Image: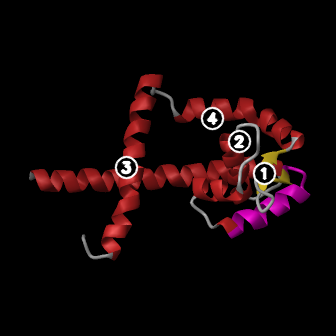
Amino acid sequence: MQVEEKLDRAVSDFIWNVVEVHCQLEEIHKSWAQLLGITEPQWLILMAIEELDEGRGVSGIAVANKLRIHPAFVTNQTKRLEKLEFLARVTSPDDARYLRISLTQKAQAEIRKLSIKRQALNSTMLDGLDEESLHYVNKRLMLLAKNSRLAPQKLSIGLL
């Protein structure tokens, strides 16, 4: 097998492994969501808010950017999550045109209840990877994510 064929095989294997991991993560997110009586996208919104909030709430735009989804979808779903008492949406003290979204005590308590199961699941998924290995993989994945954002742009303007 020539060098180019080996590289093509490695790229193909990588892509299919990413697809497999993505599919498994989707199933896991659906399971967590079902335990809370919400949808998978709503679960991901809660997780993004938990990740992004540094004590002042987060904007819907920040959540949309984190999840790579349309801000209007975030607005729609956060309204639903607010009705379920998982989120609080308050006017930003910096600019009254914007809302700051944060998890409610109820949401935090429900997420805490799942934390032991989530830790066990993470241990299973990451079995065989120590902290250094995981750091290495994450650095490489961040580079791939950055590069993959450029690829569609190049493709659309005919550079590829």
Say which element carries label 3. helix
| Residue 114 or residue 103, whichever sits in front | 103
On screen, 117 above or below 10? Answer: above
Question: Separation of disc 2 and disc 3 at Cα?
Answer: 26 Å
Label 1 amino acid?
A: Ile
Label 4 amino acid?
A: Leu
Question: Separation of disc 4 and disc 3 at Cα?
Answer: 25 Å
Q: Residue drawn 70% across and 69% down?
A: 72
Q: Position of residue 34 (x, y in %)?
A: 77, 52
Which mark, residue 144?
3
Q: Earlier in the sequence, mark 1 or mark 4?
A: 1
Say which element carries label 1. strand
Which portion, as a residue range, is magenta? 72-87
71 relative to 18 in the view: left or right: right
Q: Which residue is mark 4?
A: 121
User: Is 81 contained in the magenta span?
Assistant: yes
Q: Nearer the viewer, mark 2 or mark 4?
A: 2
Q: Quadrant of the C terminus?
A: bottom left
| Residue 139 or residue 23, whichever sits in front | 139
Q: Are marks 4 and 3 in contact (CB under 8 Å)?
A: no
Q: Residue drawn 64% across and 54% down?
A: 62
Q: Which residue is mark 1?
A: 101
Q: Which residue is mark 2?
A: 53
Which mark, residue 60?
none
Label 3 amino acid?
A: Leu
What's the coloring here? Answer: secondary structure
Q: Earlier in the sequence, mark 2 or mark 3?
A: 2
Q: Nearer the viewer, mark 4 or mark 3?
A: 3
